[in-house]
Amino acid sequence: MNKSSKLINWQPDRSKYPELDENGKAIIDLSSQKFIKTWQGPNHPGVTGNMSLELTISGDEVVEAKTHVGYLHRGFEKLMERRLYIQCFPTCVRMCVPEADSNEYVLAAGIEELDNIEVPEMALWLRTLVLEMARLQVLLRTVPGQASTLSLGLGGQWGMYLRDLILDRFEELTGGRIYHMFIIPGGVRGNLPSGFKDRMEENLKLIDDFIIRIEDLIFTNSVFNKRTIGVGVIDPKWVSQYGIVGPNARAAGFKRDVRKDYPYLKYNELDYDVYTRTDSDIYGRSQVRKNDLIQTVDLIRQILAKMPEKGDLRAKTPNVMHWKVPKGETYQRSESSRGEYGLYLVSDGSKYPRRANLRGPSYTHAVSLLERMLINSNISDTHAIMVSLQTCPPEIER
Amino acid sequence: MGLKELVTPFTAWKNVIKDPVTVKDPFNDRPGAERYRGFHKNDVEECIGCGTCEDICENEAIDLVPVEGIETKDGDSGLRPRLDYGRCCWCALCVDVCTTGSLTLSNEYTWVSEDPEDFRYTPGTDKKEWDDNERGWKKPEGGYEFYARERVAMPELHAEDRDKSFIEFVTGYSKQQAEEEADRCVECGICTATCPAHMGIPEYIKAIRNDDLEEGLRILYETNPLPEICGRICTHKCETVCSMGHRGDPISIRWLKRYIADQNPSEKYKEILNQGNVENNGKKVAIIGSGPSGLSAAYYLALTGYDCTIYEKLPQAGGMMRYGIPEYRLPYDQIDKDIDYILSLGVKIKYNVNIGTDFTLEQLGKDYDAVFSGTGLHLGRSTRIPGSDNENVYFATDLLREIALEDDIPVEKKIVVIGGGNVAMDITRSLARLQNIKYGKVDITATSLESEDIMPADREEVVEAREEKAIVDPGWGPKEIEIKDGKVKGLRVVKCLSVFDEKGAFSPKFDENNKKFFEADMVVESIGQGMDTGYLTEEIKSQLEFGPRGRIIVDEYFQSGLNWLFVGGDIIQGPDVIHGIANGHRAAVGIDLFLNK
């Protein structure tokens, strides 16, 4: 190895600090002046949402990490207990902001399950479409967003523009851009506007092109590869221990996808495979998400081709002003872009839910898993690792 | 890592020569989508201020407030929704739940103002530039409803099963039907404001939903001691104004009331209503007439501890409810159920007593601490056309009374009824039944001055009369009853063009060339009723004030110029049962205030 390549491949000697105790845990003595405590977030452009990481570093190495939430001051689950079921519909949307449709779906599905309501065929197709569109707009931001954490922002800008086009489609279909409030208990709130399919196809073509462009820009990029391959590895042993789901689990070789494992809506009638990898590092997870993006574009094309032209939008339900959902409990799940997204709903037979508990994947990904993964990582990689888990603080703090 | 990974990313430079994709002037170049949920609009003329939008709003962003230029009236609370954009989340549930469809959203989404107070506004009243914007969110179509728009049909006997007897033909809701119908209510309370008795309608409908019919009965008796009766024959002004009626059928409020009363057995009333023992306060009140107003006054006075005695001219209690309404609409056992409960509270009743001949009103005034008179409208009014003085020309009220008294009444083969109100329909359908029983066929024609669209009778009455093979031929003005050899030959009519003038005053106009002749052996006049005030002596009359059409003028508590005399019911307001009940209740409050001064 010549001198210059030695310089490029230089790795610091991390054998000395920190010292480990008999359990293998770092002995951190702040008064020794060998450690620095630093906060990443909550006001930090690199942090996803309202969350902060309390990092203890030794040199440029993270030796201890702690996730802090509590900046949102919310309590939606509690608020829902004092709201009519129909009023929970606009409330629950806000639990995960970037992908609000999963919230709507699990709430609607929970109520429908407990009250034995059969949703019309047309509404099922529209729901499937909306959930896939939601995945699409998230992935358009997340896939190039991974490169943005490593200071390659160009792909992120391309993705943001295309995401806006999908939000335009959302706007004409649902009347809203971020909070669509479309999947209402009992059905959906509107049919496809005329010309929607054509405009969607135009957007999908741009996205096809975009995928080729980011392949060149990001995935065929020495800097990106250098900083992501072998970095932020999730040990496959952890997957079951931590309850890791979605792309994070798929990149570790697990075929976990609620759409396949517990089929819901119209996913049974769609043709697709679950893409997995085994490298389980940031690069691997990025590849899984890129493939999800390709798959979602294909699924939307399939849905638009297969769905009926017209049909009932909403099942007959009791009057929403005093809708009493029969006593019972249910757990409803859907595959969000981040993985299994579930709602545990308990009804005591009154007009208000007794308990609504949302289980978002970030609860484990951003807290226990991230805290473990950051140890021994380089401080400059913390954003990349966090973003590669696709953490979403609002679903931690419900 | 090869050269490819170092070079390929630089291909992105080719984008430098591409056109930018940004919108240069988004405020003007980019309107919201057709369905965009932007700022609120409200058609204030269409809106009735029912407040359902306020109820559904999870953020409490909507308040119903009084606005200038909108008057409170029957069917309109006079309030309009005011939006607080510090709270609104633009979910548009208010639009989807709106009972009239007046509330919509525009697709406008930019609004700049320095004054935060601006963002609290009343759409439609506070003029905004997006008021005329046709685009934006509207209630979705295609089977998307937050509540059922059609009412649950009331089961009825078929015409052929009912037209030969006086059996009750409306069979009443089942539990499932009643709960389904009760579910449609949005609890706006527009009905309560309009009901003369201000019954707690949304509350008792809620009791049906909760399957708590005992609570329902308690709510009914708070304002109405005749629920079985009102549940069958009330003129249901509540349903006329029901907010659900704007886009669909109004709630069947009357039938739901009947359902509560029907399901509670009379022997449990006292226990349910907890009215076992009322302490007597030692004061006595006389009540003239056992119609709805008299019974209502007696009920509420008895509950307050007054010793009430009702004086009734006829052999049974109920007044017009028994002697004016046919049994097929209001069976006698149901009248008895309500009345017997009132009598069980210690109310005394004296039958076959005629005030004016058996007792004088002055004597009652001396013997009792207060007197309530609800003597009703029992006299028929005549058209006074030539021939109307013939012996084969009858008044509907007289015939209906005689049917109830089980007297023989004349039933000819061909009958014509003059009148288009509910009483006209009652006598038409009663006589049709009697013709059917006597001759095996129906030949009766009801004709009214009013054309079909403005006939005062309830629509279902007209429909049902036709089902029972009676002919209803409205829009004709009676000119002459043709008499030959002292016998009725028929009724001559001319086409009536309009009944009211531009100011709404009664001033019928006829087309004298468009004539018709209804053959008949018997004519019944049913064009309204008058009161019999024979029991008021000259001396009492001199102390009372009279308004138009001889109506006694009373104050808000139905107290007349003579302070011990309270007057109510059809002779003051109405004519209908629910006004009578409301008057009786109010007069009972007035008597209590008067006697405890």
Image: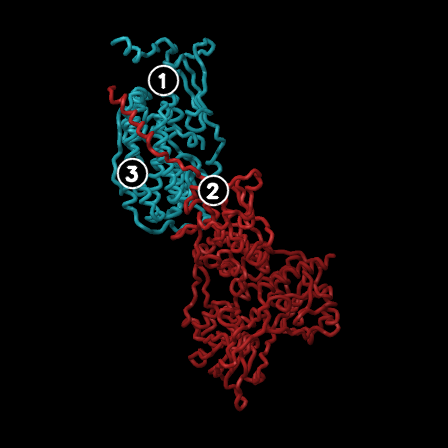
The amino acid type found where label 3 is placed reads: Lys
Q: Residue at x 54, y 83 (%)?
A: B480
Q: Quadrant of the C terminus of chain B?
A: bottom right
Residue A377's label in the rendered image is 1
Q: Is residue A94 left or right of residue B527?
A: left
Q: Is residue B552 left or right of residue B267?
A: right
The residue wearing badge 2 is B109
Q: CA distance from mark 1 to mark 3?
A: 39 Å
**Chain displayed in red:** B
Q: Position of residue B481 (x, y in %)?
A: 54, 84
Residue A202 location, quadrant: top left
The amino acid type found where label 2 is placed reads: Tyr
Which element type, helix, strand or loop, lies under badge 3?
A: helix
The amino acid type found where label 1 is placed reads: Ser
Q: Are marks 1 and 2 on the same chain?
A: no
Residue A205's label in the rendered image is 3
Q: Quadrant of the N terminus of chain B?
A: top left
**Chain displayed in cyan:** A
- Nearest the viewer among B371 and A355 is A355
